[in-house]
């Protein structure tokens, strides 16, 4: 795998800010002509550095006013138990992120829902129905101080 150089980093930073930037504008901003800039973007995509292009959406505008961080402790930490949990939650649209953790808890989830009643429904109809969960601890976000999907380059 070829190392990512300063120009690639500039391209990545600009695309993270605005993935709809034209190739001409991108090339101008990184100091290349269009063809070499396009080749670099394609290579970054092929190498899996750039994984996809998305639109970010304001969660409040969709009526999803509640963000919950949920710590999960499993009864057992055997590989099959971890895999079963990960597979179960992977299809739930309320779960935006899930991390396998070290420390006191096995998983940390970020969940968004419309309101407390929706969270209660999520908890009762999905999360508590999974076998092998020893404990669930929910923390509700009061406000979002920072949010970014752009990685530091």
Image: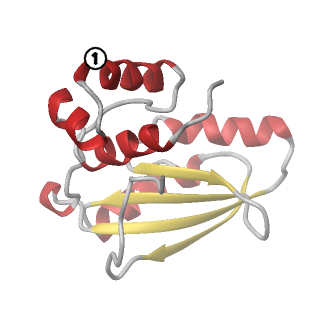
- Above or below residue 83? Residue 145 is below
- Above or below residue 1? Residue 20 is below
Q: Residue at x 52, y 72 (%)?
A: 138
- Left or right: 87, with 116 as reference point: right
Task: Name the quarter where the N terminus is drawn.
Answer: top right
- Above or below residue 128? Residue 139 is below
Q: Pointer 1: what residue? A: 35
- Left or right: 40, with 102 as reference point: left
- Image position, residue 23 (x, y; %): 20, 28
Dividing the picture into quarters, in which one does residue 120 lie?
bottom left
- Image position, residue 36 (x, y; %): 34, 20
Q: Secondary structure at mark 1?
A: helix
Task: Give the camera-side residue of 101 and 113.
Answer: 101
Q: Residue at x 39, y 77 (%)?
A: 141
- Image position, residue 105 (x, y; %): 73, 65
- Left or right: 102, with 11 as reference point: right
Q: How many tags in the picture?
A: 1
What sort of colour scheme is used for the picture? Answer: secondary structure
- Image position, residue 85 (x, y; %): 66, 42
Q: Residue at x 21, y 50 (%)?
A: 57
Task: Give the camera-side residue of 32 and 100.
Answer: 32
Q: Residue at x 20, y 37 (%)?
A: 28
Dividing the picture into quarters, in which one does residue 134 lie?
bottom right
Residues packed near mark 1 inside 10 Å, few (<14), some (14 to 19) or many (20 plus): few
């Amino acid at each position: 795998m070829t190392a990512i150089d300063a120009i690639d980093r500039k391209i990545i930073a600009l695309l993270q800010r605005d993935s709809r930037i034209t190739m001409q504008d991108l090339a101008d901003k990184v100091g290349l002509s269009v063809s070499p800039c396009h080749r670099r973007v394609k290579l970054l995509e092929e190498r899996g550095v750039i994984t996809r292009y998305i639109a970010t959406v304001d969660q409040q505008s969709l009526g999803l006013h509640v963000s919950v961080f949920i710590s999960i402790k499993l009864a057992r930490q055997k590989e099959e138990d971890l895999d079963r949990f990960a597979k179960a939650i992977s299809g739930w649209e309320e779960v935006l992120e899930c991390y396998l953790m070290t420390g006191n808890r096995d998983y940390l989830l970020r969940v968004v829902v419309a309101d407390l009643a929706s969270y209660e429904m999520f908890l009762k109809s999905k999360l508590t129905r999974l076998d092998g969960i020893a404990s669930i601890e929910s923390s509700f976000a009061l406000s979002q101080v920072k949010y970014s999907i752009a990685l530091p380059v």
